[in-house]
Image (tube, rainbow, N blue to C red):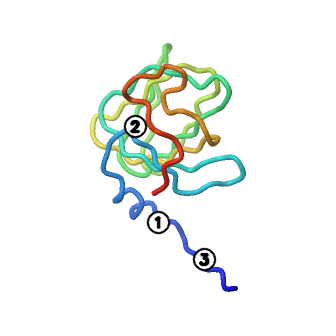
Amino acid sequence: MVTQHHAINFSEKLAKITDLWQPRVIAEMNDYQFKAVRIEGDFIWHQHADTDETFIVLSGQLRIDFRDGSVSIGPGEMFVVPKGVEHKPFAEREVHLLLIEPRGVLNTGHAGGDRTAQNDIWV
């Protein structure tokens, strides 16, 4: 049996994602998923009570708002939002992100609403 090895190309994966705010799984490591997502505009205030969430900006400029301030993240930068910290991502123009979080984490935490994406959709 021959195993084929392929690198994951972020640009190719993002080109297959047409909807904004709909993270798609591109890889898994142990119980963690790597998700590609295109975002633009304002998200909702939410938190993840049981896990940290990692944002890696591939292109564009992301701002993550907190109740006591904000952080700006540019291409090639990352930020980890600690578990239990309420936050709200915002992108004035389209941003391409890589999210790293445990399998099964909802993008809106327990806030729910129409921005909640279906989990475990691979691209």
Mark 1 and mark 2 lie on one chain; the one further toward the N terminus is 1
Res. 66 mark: none
* In-front residue for pair 16/84: 16
- Front disc: 3 or 2: 3
Residue 93 is left or right of residue 108, and the answer is left
Name the residue that disc number 2 marks: 62
Which amino acid does the dot numbered 2 rest on?
Answer: Leu
Q: Nearer the viewer, residue 3 or 14?
A: 3
- Quadrant of the image for the N terminus? bottom right
| Quadrant showing the C terminus | bottom left
Instruction: Point out the residue furthest to the top here.
Output: 68
Residue 69 position within the rendered picture, expressed as x and y whole percent measured from the top left: 47, 18
| 92 to 123, vertically: above or below | above
Tag 1: Cα neighbours inside 10 Å, few (<14), some, or many (≥20)? few
Comparing 103 with 74, the one in front is 103
Percent of width and height locating residue 37? 42, 46
Q: Which residue is mark 3?
A: 5
Please give left or right for residue 110 compared with residue 63 in the image: right
Q: CA distance from mark 3 to mark 2?
A: 32 Å
Dot 2 lies on which element? strand
Residue 9 marker = 1
Under tag 1, what secondary structure? loop
- Report the residue at 30% width, 43% height from top: 94
Q: Horizontal placement of 10 versus 18: left or right?
A: right
Q: Amino acid under label 1?
A: Asn
- Foreground tag (1 vs 2): 1
